[in-house]
Amino acid sequence: MSRLEQGFAAVGIAGLVLCALGAPLDAKAMLGAWLAAALFALSLSLGALTILMVHGLTGGRWGEAVRQPLRIMIAMLPFALVLLLPVLMRLDLVFPWAGADSGMLPEKVREKLAYLNVPFFLLRCAVCAAIWLVLTWMVLDATSDEASSNGRNGKKLALGLILHALAVSIFSIDWMLSLEPEFTSTIYALCETSAEVVGAFAVAVLVLAARRAVEVLPGGDEETSLSEDLANMQFGFLLTWIYLVFMQWIVVWGGDLPDEIHWYIVRATGSWQYLLWLLVALPAAAFAGSLSRPPKRSHDGLIWLAGIVLAGHFVDVFWRVRPPLLSGGQLALWHDAVAWIGVGGLWLALFLFLLRRPDRIVWWKREVAHG
């Protein structure tokens, strides 16, 4: 490992030690903070899966350019799944329906207990993990240089997208919506999928721009640079995310749904309102910047646009997941600090290692194939 990778690994281990020390003091607060960080790490791998499967069906130079960082994020999916294990060990501390007396739950929640029960939850989690691990192996194989050249993976990728959509829908309902089981949204899974795509693509663009001068590379048209193509694709993903989130809000407020409105009120009062303003401002800034051609044809402009989009995804995950699990005021945010340091440090160390040694992905595939 390089010094930078060792440094991130050391920071991550230090964060894990602090998490372990803080868990006995307040296990519920620590697991709540850990869940948000773990879901963010997993969202990048799942978003990369979506993008590469879509690109495998549609083609395009934009996907070829960001294929390597996306493949690395996909290869890190097992690591992201492992991060969920601490929460699985104490579901009762995170999810209000797990281990609770059914008689004390609201009637709307009791009606969902046939679905929201621990054994069925664990079974669904295992099925989703199995689907994603199989898709990881398949997509890494289908997007290798040799496989990409023969173009014979269309049926596999189409079926993979269907299974992936099903798994993301189940996972987002189980791990996010059920944090507040009174809240119901039929579009939430689409919002989560679009957010995952936005975050993963932003990471891939940042990695590519940090390593190459993409603004001088040719794009799809004669007068278009590769950086402009990437910025336009990012803009399309961003618009989809904004549209879906806005439609969910419109349906909730237009329909005057009390439980669903309460979900928004919790995230729009107190200190959370400042995070909400930031969540609105960051996509709006990226939207405005993407309307102008010069930033998209500039190296610094592309980095800034991708950085703002990634920051928006980070704020979005924290804003959606953390409010119902945070108690004790702003001082309790030290749990989040150590959780993000632990997860972020280890994630960056592993990502940079695979980025420098992409042959390790081939080794990983070989080990999976041979059991």
Image (cartoon, grey):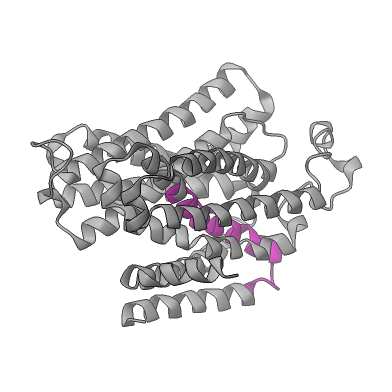
Q: Residue at x 34, y 42 (%)?
A: 282
Q: Is residue 127 left or right of residue 362?
A: right
- Residue 221: where, in percent of width, then height? 14, 35
Q: Does residue 278 appear in this view?
A: no
Q: Is residue 236 above or below residue 129?
A: above
Q: Does residue 7 appear in this view?
A: yes
Q: Is residue 37 magenta?
A: yes
Q: Is residue 108 above or below residue 154?
A: above
- Residue 199: where, in percent of width, then height? 40, 48
Q: Is residue 319 above or below residue 130?
A: above
Quarter of the image where the N terminus is located: bottom left
- Camera-side residue: 50 or 237? 50
- Camera-side residue: 366 or 173? 366
- Residue 62: where, in percent of width, then height? 26, 44
Q: Residue at x 57, y 53 (%)?
A: 132
The stretch in magenta equals 21-48
Give the dominant element type of the magenta stretch: helix, strand or loop.
helix
Q: Is residue 4 left or right of residue 61?
A: right
The number of discs equals 0
- Camera-side residue: 204 or 248? 204
Q: Is residue 356 magenta?
A: no
- Camera-side residue: 148 or 329? 148
Q: Residue at x 24, y 44 (%)?
A: 61
Quarter of the image where the C terminus is located: bottom right
Q: Residue at x 60, y 65 (%)?
A: 82
- Residue 368: where, in percent of width, then height? 55, 67
Q: Is residue 267 left or right of residue 356?
A: right
**Image quarter of residue 189:** top right
